[in-house]
Amino acid sequence: MPEPSLWDMLLKLIVSVLVGGLIGVERETHGRPAGLRTHILVCLGSTLFGLCSYTIAGNRFDPGRISAQIVTGIGFLGAGTIMRQGSVVRGLTTAASIWTVAAIGLAVAVGGDMLLVALAASILVVATLNLIPHFERRVLQKGSERVLNITLAPGIEPTCNALGVLSSCGARVRVLGSEETPDGARQVLRVRVRLPDSFDEAMFDNEIRSQKGVFGYSWE
């Protein structure tokens, strides 16, 4: 592959900023741990690594050696966005979007028809992040969605117990957050849950109140 010109490389860097930002804006507006700047830098860095690969390799060596390291190396950055809170794991979608953005950045570095492929991939990623959740809510996840506030004793065990009761009743946790009361003696766990049609609130009430460290709860 012939070495790209200076203007060609600069154009590719600009394109990588644009397509990375397209996905980053979507993540930023949804308050994800990796937003606009992260996605732009991942895409830009992947493109730059790709350009370096072709420049260093020239016509004598394999240009894929540096690029291949991005596929595995980007996993460490994506892992930093994954958080486990009790039985809930968050950040997997953002980690996947970072990994995909790195691939898009490499596609930009290749150039030619791959520029159109990179643009199409960016549009598909944004469409997936925006449209699939609506499909999941309307088709795959039937039931009502409510917000539950649970007052607990501080510590991991009461939180796990409360989430375990929700899981045993068939509820699916969508959003999780917690804060301590002003005196620090208790914490309030705020959970957005999707309840199945078969959800038995009386059984849930008996189960949650019997858990050690649970002082009460309220629905919004």
Image (tube, rainbow, N blue to C red):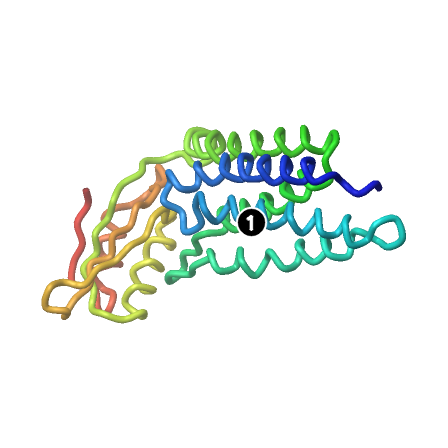
Q: Determine whether, in the image, residue 129 is placed left or right of residue 182.
A: right
Return the residue nearer the eye: 95 or 216: 95
| Local secondary structure at mark 1 | helix
Residue 155, image x, y percentages? 27, 71
Task: Using the rendered view, name the quadrant where residue 154 is placed.
Answer: bottom left
Question: Does 145 sit above or below residue 190?
Answer: above
Residue extending furthest toward the left: 183
Task: Using the rendered view, name the quadrant where residue 111 is placed.
Answer: top right
Residue 80, image x, y percentages? 48, 60
Residue with the mark numbered 1: 42
Question: Does 46 sit above or below residue 156?
Answer: above
Return the residue nearer the eye: 141 or 43: 43
Q: Residues within 10 Å of mark 1 (few under 14, many from 20)?
A: many
Q: Residue placed at 36% from the left, 60% from the top? A: 164
Residue 195, image x, y percentages? 33, 42
Q: Residue placed at 80% from the left, 51% from the top? A: 63
Q: Disc 1 residue type?
A: Val
Q: Determine whether, in the image, residue 103 is placed left or right of residue 22.
A: right
Quarter of the rendering occupied by the N terminus: top right
Residue extending furthest toward the right: 60
